[in-house]
Image (cartoon, rainbow, N blue to C red):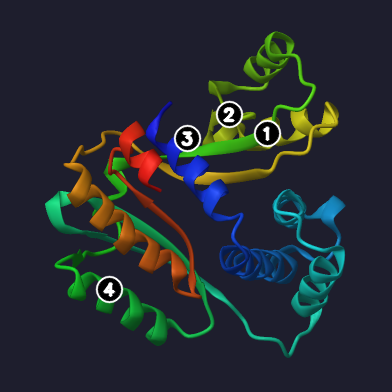
Amino acid sequence: MSGHSKWSTIKRKKGAADAKRSKIFSKIVKDITVAVKEGGPDPDANPRLRLAIANAKGVSMPKDNIERAISKGKDKDSANFTELTYEGYLSHGIAVYIECTTDNQQRTVSNIRAIFNKYSGNLGTNGSLSFMFDRKGVFTVPKGEIDPEEFELEMIDAGAEDIEEEDGFFSITTAMEDFGTMQKKLEELGIEPESAELQRIPRDTVKLEKEDALKILKVIELFEDDDDVQKVFHNLEITDEMMEEM
């Protein structure tokens, strides 16, 4: 199982906890709000909103929460969010790429910088790490009653570069430009993914001793717990031994 698939598995398991679930809901509400402000409240005419709603359903967000988030996006007086990215290194040369959505840029950069500084990291300039990551579409689909062989052929036809099966889920990776095609194919098949998102996949990973690696993962979790942070990507290799510790 590739590193990003392992990380997706970890996030899925962590998402089962109530505290984590409320954080996940908060991040999806922001996604929905930004999508509505950008492209309007009609999911049929707004692909980004359609995707955000699908992700909300994937984590069992109540319909009322989704509708409130759409209403919030339509409200001209509600906060305007800005999407920002931060890049830097943690100890042992681990690269991290952080995507944020915020209504207060000064607060966000202050919080991000504080975590880097506290844990011997270094906040870099934008673009300094982009060469280390490829932007890919990643879809997580519950296996359910799906026929694996037939499903794999359909996914390859829609542009899948990689298909992995783990713990009752398929993880499908596509090139960024094939993201929309894959999304449409799953809709045609009547398959609702648990999540569908663009991720930054490291071209190479760094393997550390377990103790050092778990310390890095704790710092990454601190970034993820910040209310302004939407996603954190990294190039730490996730081993099977580390999966057991998570």
Residue that numbered label 1 is attached to: 141
Cα separation between marks 2 and 3 = 9 Å
Residue at image point 58% right, 77% down: 81
Cα separation between marks 4 and 1 = 33 Å
Residue at the bottom extreme of this rendering: 77
Residue 122's x, y, as percent?
17, 66
| Circle 1/circle 2 CB separation < 8 Å | yes
Cα separation between marks 1 and 2 = 8 Å
Of labels 2 and 3, earlier in sequence is: 3
Q: Compare residues 19 and 40 and report the one nearer the observer.
A: 19
Of labels 4 and 3, earlier in sequence is: 3
113 relative to 122, above or below? below
Q: Is residue 85 visible?
A: no
Residue 173's x, y, as percent?
54, 30
Residue that numbered label 3 is attached to: 5
Instruction: For the N terminus, give its image quadrant.
Output: top left
Cα separation between marks 2 and 4 = 32 Å
| Secondary structure state at the residue bearing disc 1 | strand
Of labels 1 and 2, earlier in sequence is: 1
Residue that numbered label 2 is attached to: 172
Amino acid type at circle 4 is Ile
On residue 115, the disc is: 4
Cα separation between marks 1 and 3 = 12 Å
Residue at image point 34% right, 80% down: 111
